[in-house]
């Protein structure tokens, strides 16, 4: 394999890994506030892409406005989901809540199939599709959008945690919910905010990836599992680990295409997930940074 080919695989891996990282951040936010895994996370990705496509191509809204509205709608869906499905069962066991998220995932998937149909849908790249040469490899403007948005989200999230009162309340809730309540923090609202932010990040990921790989009612489960694998790889509950896990998973997937076969690309994520669970359940950064969100 030539150096430019390897570079091409790495760039492709960072692009897909950035999407996995955004989804993994959603898993992390909800896990930190509720200690449950939200298996409906992938459906927020699917809804983000489909709402953006409809708002842009059917209602003919400007692209930026269509994206903002799509993120807002999915964020509201996340809040409604927390209010109607999670909050009434907050005292139930963890396995009950996980089953609820799986049920919600199936419901959203089927509603999307009825509303949007089975055909894949797409939208144009944000700023054209002319590839840029980078040391012999090609990088599309949409890939730069994906990577740039992830960097911006990570910076904004760190500032949110460190500089805002609400961010510090979320941090306190993730470390010790009982102590946070005793300090006067409304942990119920923190949980709702976690679901809202989680849905927002997922919808953003769905919108960013749609011009590259299209979207449909069925992409949520697949991307959700990749995001979950990234979160576990980096260390479930650790936002930095989620980003590291996402990028690493994407690069490993992409490079495996060059060294093994494209047929094994999707199996890599689940192989990595199993290996991490067997060898280091806390993930790459889980044990070291847990509690220092």
Image: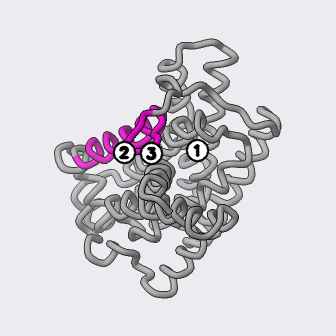
Q: Which mark is residue 88?
A: none
134 to the left or right of 213: left
For the residue pair 148 and 190, the one nearer the viewer reads as 148
User: What is the chief secondary structure element of the magenta stretch?
Assistant: helix
For the residue pair 16 and 216, the one nearer the viewer reads as 16
Cβ atoms at labels 1 and 3 below 8 Å apart: no
Q: Which residue carries the number 3 mark?
A: 137
For the residue pair 77 and 42, the one nearer the viewer reads as 42
Q: Nearer the viewer, mark 1 or mark 2?
A: 2
Whichever of callouts 1 and 2 sits on the residue coming sooner in the sequence is 1
For the residue pair 280 and 92, the one nearer the viewer reads as 280
Q: Residue at x 82, y 39 (%)?
A: 118
Q: Which residue carries the number 1 mark?
A: 45
Residue 24 seen in this snapshot: no
- Report x, y in % for residue 247: 42, 58
Cβ atoms at labels 2 and 3 below 8 Å apart: yes
The reply to whether the magenta stretch includes residue 5 is: no
- Report x, y in % for residue 207: 55, 35
CA gap, disc 1 and disc 2: 32 Å
Residue 206 seen in this snapshot: yes
| Label 3 CA crowd tier, 10 Å (few <14, some 14–19, many 20+) | some
Q: Quadrant of residue 291?
A: bottom left
The secondary element bearing badge 3 is classed as: strand
Q: Which residue carries the number 2 mark?
A: 135
Q: Residue at x 68, y 48 (%)?
A: 219
The reply to whether the magenta stretch includes residue 148 is: yes
Q: Nearer the viewer, mark 1 or mark 3?
A: 3
Q: Which residues are magenta?
A: 132-158
CA gap, disc 1 and disc 3: 29 Å
- Report x, y in % for residue 263: 70, 64
The secondary element bearing badge 1 is classed as: helix
Q: Outermost residue toward the front?
A: 2
């Amino acid at each position: 394999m030539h150096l430019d080919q390897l570079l091409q695989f790495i760039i492709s891996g960072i692009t897909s890994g950035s999407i996995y990282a955004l989804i993994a951040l959603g898993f992390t936010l909800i896990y930190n506030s509720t200690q449950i895994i939200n298996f409906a996370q992938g459906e927020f990705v699917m809804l983000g892409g489909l709402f953006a496509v409809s708002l842009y191509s059917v209602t003919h809204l400007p692209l930026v406005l269509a994206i903002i509205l799509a993120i807002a709608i999915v964020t509201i869906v996340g809040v409604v989901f927390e209010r109607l499905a999670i909050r009434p069962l907050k005292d139930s066991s963890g396995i009950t809540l996980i089953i609820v998220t799986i049920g919600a995932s199936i419901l959203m998937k089927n509603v999307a199939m009825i509303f949007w149909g089975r055909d894949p849908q797409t939208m144009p790249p944000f700023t054209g599709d002319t590839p840029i040469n980078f040391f012999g490899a090609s990088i599309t403007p949409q890939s730069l959008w994906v990577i740039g948005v992830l960097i911006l989200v990570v910076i904004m999230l760190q500032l949110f945690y460190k500089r805002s009162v609400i961010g510090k309340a979320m941090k306190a809730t993730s470390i010790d919910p009982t102590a946070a309540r005793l300090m006067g923090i409304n942990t119920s609202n923190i949980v709702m905010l976690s679901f809202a932010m989680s849905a927002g990040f997922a919808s953003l990921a769905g919108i960013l990836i749609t011009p590259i790989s299209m979207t449909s009612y069925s992409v949520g489960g697949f991307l959700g599992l990749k995001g979950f694998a990234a979160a576990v790889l980096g260390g479930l509950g650790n936002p930095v680990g989620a980003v590291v896990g996402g990028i690493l998973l994407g690069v490993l997937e992409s490079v495996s295409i060059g060294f093994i076969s494209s047929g094994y690309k999707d199996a890599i994520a689940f192989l990595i997930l199993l290996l991490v669970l067997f060898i280091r359940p806390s993930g790459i950064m889980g044990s070291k940074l847990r509690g220092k969100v």
